[in-house]
Image (tube, rainbow, N blue to C red):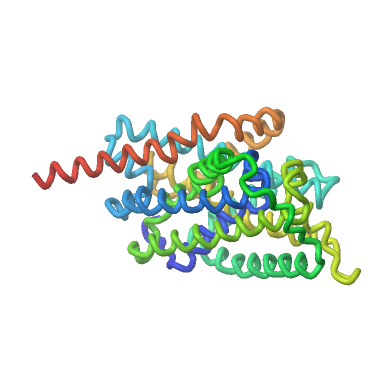
Amino acid sequence: MNKIKIDQKQMFSLMFLFVLSAIVTSLTPNAGQDSWISIFIGMLGSLCLYLFIFCQIFNHYPELPLTGILVKVFSKYIGIPLSLVYLCYFVYITAIATRHLADTITTHILSETPIAVVCFLMILLIVYGCYLGFEVLGRTAEILLIWMVIFGLTGNLSVIASGIIKWKNLQPVLENGWLPVLKDAFLVSFSFPMGEIFLFLMFLPYLNRPESARKAGSAALVLSGLSLSWTFMLIITVIGPSGADAADIPLLNMVEKINVGNFIQRMDSIVVGTFVLGFFIKISLYFYAIVLGVTDVFKIKNYRRMIIPAASLVFITTIFIGEYKEEYGRFRQEIFPYIVELPLIIGIPLLLLFLIWVRKRFRKK
């Protein structure tokens, strides 16, 4: 994989679609009609994390993925176990995202198809993409980004033309004060979806121009964050805060109300298409991270040897999670961000950056 290089546009496309995949989920359980404010503040927080922590780490070791940096800084006795913890996290998120995508497809498109079959086909497609290489995924993201923009503009114009926007649903602003807004903003910035941008510490070494990492990541976070904030504000104006909280896919509930001249209706397929495009990129990137991480930790020469074992592990985990869907959903929203993602996304990178600075200072002396 050391010879793989992608350009700034491809990295931007991957990052943008990775974050924007959250557009079809429920992000902020506490802020109500102020959820769009939480997303905007969360975008600013994640931007600070990316620029002042993740990019700083990358600048010191621009040729190493996250697993390699952990071993380099903490030594192999601590770095390898930490890398394995991150790999387990990648497997878990890959399985969760795959199951979520399969549930949506079987609910809204292939209602008669067993969910295990949908999961298997999705993983098979991702395996094929991984086998082709990271450059192919980067070029694919460039193409999918165009379609995502087309879907987004079509949906927004249709909502406006339908005359279903009720701006009064946004009032009263900050009804319960800043605390619920900031709480959700904190989760958005360090956890799902924007805090997960730390995953790109596994992929930034494959930029053909390492100095463009700051620009590509910043642009992707700002534009995707503004898109999410605007979309959730639009959702609340159409279906209200209570409707958005009760819906599994608030965006889908919004587009069901579109009716332009009794001609343009039932745009559910656009939402599902957006969902599939975004989650395909997200799942593919997490799966790549698993394969690359295992290859780097165990010094395997050909990364393709680990594709089938990794896919088998993800598939088994996906089916297992489905057996306890409600319990895992509650754990993912209420406990997982604090006991797992906070240490992995903020705690360990901060410690890593601190040790890098200490070593650099001692070397100067």
**How many numbered callouts?**
0
Q: Is residue 300 visible?
A: yes
Asked if 96 appears above or below 60 in the picture, the reply is above
- The image shows residue 6 at horizontal and vertical percentages of 43, 65
136 to the left or right of 244: left
Q: Residue at x 50, y 61 (%)?
A: 220
- The image shows residue 271 at horizontal and vertical percentages of 73, 58
In depth, the one of 170 and 286 nearer the eye is 170
Quarter of the image where the C terminus is located: top left
- The image shows residue 4 at horizontal and vertical percentages of 41, 61
29 to the left or right of 136: right
64 to the left or right of 29: left
In depth, the one of 346 and 286 nearer the eye is 346
Q: Residue furthest right?
A: 262
Q: Residue at x 62, y 56 (%)?
A: 278
In depth, the one of 291 and 95 nearer the eye is 95
Q: Residue furthest left?
A: 365
108 to the left or right of 147: right
- The image shows residue 325 at horizontal and vertical percentages of 70, 32
Q: Residue at x 44, y 60 (%)?
A: 218
Q: Is residue 272 visible?
A: no
Q: Quadrant of residue 86?
A: top left
Q: Quadrant of residue 153?
A: bottom right
In depth, the one of 202 and 269 nearer the eye is 269
Asked if 186 appears above or below 258 in the picture, the reply is above
Q: Residue at x 49, y 57 (%)?
A: 221
Quarter of the image where the N terminus is located: bottom left
